[in-house]
Structure formats: C-alpha cells, structure tokens
Image (cartoon, rainbow, N blue to C red):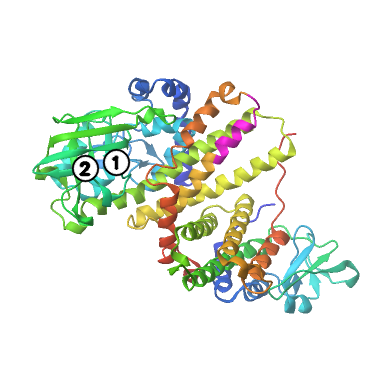
Amino acid sequence: MMDFLDELRAFARESADVLRRTTLDIDRDPSLVDGVLGGALPWRHVGMPAEYYPDPPVVQGRPVYLDSCVEQVTVLEELARADAGAVLALPGPAMSGFVVAEIADQRQRERYYGMLAERPTWTFFGMTEPSHGSDPAGMATNVTGGLLNGVKRFVGNGARARIGVVFARRSAGPLGIAAVLVETDRPGFAGVPLETLGLRALALSELRMRDVPVEVGDLLGHHRSATRQGMWAAVRTFNRYRPVVACLALGVAQAAFDYVVDNRRLMRVAQRHVLDGFAERLHGARALVLAAARSADDDPGDGTLASAAKIRATALAEEITTAAVRFFGPGARWEHPLLDKWLRDARAFEFMEGTSNIQRLNLAQGYLNGRLGHAQAA
Amino acid sequence: MSTALSVDQQHYRAVAFAHGAAAALTLLHAETSAGVLPAGPGGHVFVPEHIESACDRYETPDGPRARDGAREEPLGGVSAGLVALRIRGAGPTHGGAWPSGVAWVRLGLAERLLGQATEHLRHRTVQQTATLNLPLVRAMLADAAGGIAEAAALFAAAPGSPALHRIHRSLDEVGRLCLHLFGAVGFLATGPGGDVRASELLADAYTPERPEREGS
C-alpha cells in the first residue's frame, strides 16, 4: 500500500486542479475569492478540530482534518503549486487557530470554532505593527480599562475576517502581552485591505482598533499561568506556522520549475544544468520542510528546524521564480503571466512570520543550544 | 544509478564527528569493502594511507580485481591522512554501500567543522564582543546549520540518487561557510582547511554520476 503521506499528497495534487482555473482571475480581482473558492476543495476548513468538523476528506480510511503540521505541509504545498494566494485565502482557523488550540478555555473554544463551523469564516492573526514589526518589546497596541486600542498591519484576511486574535500589551515586560479574541463587528474595529504586488488573494489588511470593548472572557489563556499566555502561544504559533509558509514557498518554486520544464522543450546545456541544480534543491527543501513539520508537531516550543526550512524554501522560491522568467526571453513577464504571478507571490514569503534575518538568528541560537540534532545523537 | 541512503550507516556520521575523516573511512571500509579499494565512477580512489597500502584488490563494476601497478596512477595534492589514486578500469559496483557511507561520513565531518568553527569564534573578540555573537557571524552560522539540517533531513526522508547529489552539494556549501567562519585559519593546508578539502574530494571522487535529463 502507498505510504499515507504519498497518497495524501497525490489526493491534494488532484484536488488542486480547480485552483489552477481561477488563479489569474483571483490575482486580478481578489474579491472573487469568496465566490470562486466556495466549496471548490475537498477541505471546507484547514485546521479545524475533529469535534467541529464531522465530514473531512478521508484518505486510506483516515479522516484528514489538516490539524497537524505534517498534514498541512503535505497538502498545502500541492495546493500552492496551483495558487498559494488562494491557499492563504481559504476560510478557517489558520494561524489564530493555533493560539486558540493552545490556550483558549472551553467557552472561548466554543465561541471561536462554533462560529467557524456555522459557515465558512475567515480569521486573522494580528501581531505585526506599522512601526515595530512583530517585536513584542515595542508593541504599542494595548488593552487598558477594558478598551483595545492600536493598529496592526500586514494581517492576512483581516478585512474579510469575522473573528481573530489581536496581541496587545496589558502591562510592562515580556509577560505583559495578551492574546485577545475579538469579533470584527465590535464597535471601533475596522479592517482595511492593503494593495499588494503578490499573493493578492490573501487580502493583507490593516486593522484599526479604537476603544474596542473587551472583557476578561476575551483574553485567551486568562485561566493559565502568566508564563503560558500571550507571547508563549505566539512563539509556538510561529514555530508551527513557519513550516507552512516554507511549504507554500516550495509550492510556488515547484510550480515555476514545472512550467519551465513543460514549456521550454529546447534548452542549452547550461540551462539544463541550472534546472538540474534546482531539482535537487527542491528535493532537499521538501525533505527539510517535512522534518520541520514533524519537529513542530512533536515540540512546538522548538522552532530551530522551522527557521531552517523557511530560510531555504523562501530563498529557493525567489531564485527559481526569478530564473524561470529568464528562460523565456524578452517580455516574458507579460507573455507568461503565471510566471509573473509566481515571481510576485514568491517575494511575500521573505517577510511572512519573520524575515530570513530573524530566522537566521533563531537557527543560530537553536544550533548553539544543541537543538538541531547532531552527530553525537546518531 | 540508484543509491539507497541506508540509515544503518549513520554510525559513520558519529565517528566522523568525533574522530575525523580517516577514522570514519577506516570503519566504513572495514564494514563494506574490506581488502578492496573502493572506486568512484571516474576510477578514482581516495582513502586513508593505511588502507591503500593494505588492499590487494580494487573495485570494478564487475566485481573486485587484483591490483596491477601498471593501471594505477598516484594523484597528488591531498591531505588529512588520505591518498588518491586513479585506476584504469576501476569503478563502483552497482548498489554498493560505499557511496552512501561516504555521504554519512561527510555529514559528520561537516558537523565537526561547524562545531570547531563555533568554538574558534567563541574565543575571539571584535571590539570586546565575542565574534560568535556578531549578527553577521550568526547569520553565516545559521546558513551552515541550515545546510546540515537539509542534508540530515534528506537522509531521513528520501533514499535515492537525487538525494545523494543534493546532500553533497549542501555539505559543500556548509564546508565553504565554515571556511569563511575560520577566516585565514581555514586557508592553511592543515587544520580545518585541509579537512574541508578532504571532504570535498570525497564527494568529487565518489558521488554517483547524475542521470542525463531528457530533451535536447
């Protein structure tokens, strides 16, 4: 019998065809996402817990909820080969779901997953700020006197979401960051889409919060110790989501590679060598992404391999999409609009969930702390 | 040629990490090629000196053959206690364990080098800051660690020739990054520079030929 992950990958690859038909239309008009993607894929949700998702697709007799990192990187890479933007535009828990799964109490889980199960619902993860990126030390968004104030930027699906998580400062110090569960229809909350060059389906947005009322029941993890709340959950979410970003980058890279192989039959020897090198690197990056996903599932507190996977997959996506255009001569970015789209999309992964420089700092520290798994353990 | 990346061989990684190339290759040779000089696809042999002098046969695609000095040509410019030969008619046996074993050895060597580079930089300073703590140095260290992580992931996930090629290229990058971390120390023939060269020559000698891509 075929290995489960191989069969899951084959199933996802077959399912992805539907995304290929719409990818350029959605790129031109991201507002088509809702109508075009509704019900198009076998998964209605990505990352919903079993109790809220009674009818997931089944592969080899196993329900596939896409609630593990390994399942996600396997399936989402294949979908991203068709349209990474559409993958990121799928309704469901996405990043905020990791936070809810980690630290929400039962009432908060009901509130969040109940809303998502009711009908396809987008969510958001509000961390990055205009002046401070994702640096918690500089976070200006705050919860004071029951009111949430601040601005979050570069938030995926922010303008179309109904619920999500905003990180905000409650008190000084690293333990003073809270994860706040917020519905977007509260007074004072506004989500404004940003015009982007690539991954346009994602609808990166700015969230503006002015005196948004919040209460204790909105603070995720309020029932837990202070060291197991906001930033603790955020770090674990990044560690789990970076392999996913890496798999999306890998999907875009593979799509551009496949396009060259399929459409450029006559090649010089030097060009074939370039492609051979890319093929090997795709192979290596895929193995590393899977290893990172396994590590994230085993111990979401350790992001060492997640950073390694993101660095290498992101760089590869940028290199392959840039090189792919050059295989087709002058005007290729107009004559081959898919290549142009993938090139624009690939550049997004660099800044998502931490730039490569941030990943390098994580990876170096992880290595120095002996978290990479090395020869002594062999 | 398909070459499986047997996980049974990962003890070569540990020996290479702890004791270096010669010790690991000695163990690999004893367990996979005793009495026979292992050859790469170009007929090259690159082994510790004592193995070269002790073997009375060499590997060919059709099985071991007795050594004949007239077919052998010593090759210079090597280091780390290893010697190189070219033997006319020599070549790897299909499915032999030596090429994948060499890749495991190289992984251990890369980890050994990066560990040495880290220790080297931990004890140097630039304007009273440990060199290891400079962000640009950390970035280079991370890229080297990423190369090791990719090679290790390939061993775990993907048997076969494409994986072996990528493992070697990834470890080549790690070696070069380590040399950058060592600075001028890495340019000396002995020490880390010589070790990187030996590791690169192992890949040069023993990486299986890549199948030709179809098309014109």
Residues at circles 1 and 2 in contact by the CB criterion of under 8 Å: yes
B115 or B31: nearer the viewer: B115
A85 or A315: nearer the viewer: A315
At x 64%, y 25%, the residue is A330
Q: Which stretch did the figure color magenta?
A: A319-330
Name the kind of residue labelled 1 in the image: Glu
> Quarter of the image holding residue A203?
top left
Q: Say whether residue A75 is magenta.
A: no
Q: Which residue is the site of mark 1?
A: A129
Residue A354 in view: yes
Instruction: Give the x, y percent position of residue A71.
Output: 39, 44
**Residue B75 falls left or right of residue A229:** right
At x 51%, y 44%, the residue is A315
Q: Secondary structure at mark 2?
A: loop
How far apart in space, not on screen, are marks 1 and 2 (Cα)? 8 Å
Name the kind of residue labelled 2 in the image: Thr
Q: Which residue is the site of mark 2?
A: A141
Instruction: Give the x, y percent position of residue B3.
Output: 65, 56
At x 31%, y 45%, the residue is A132
Q: Secondary structure at mark 1?
A: loop
Disc nearer the start of the sequence (1/2): 1
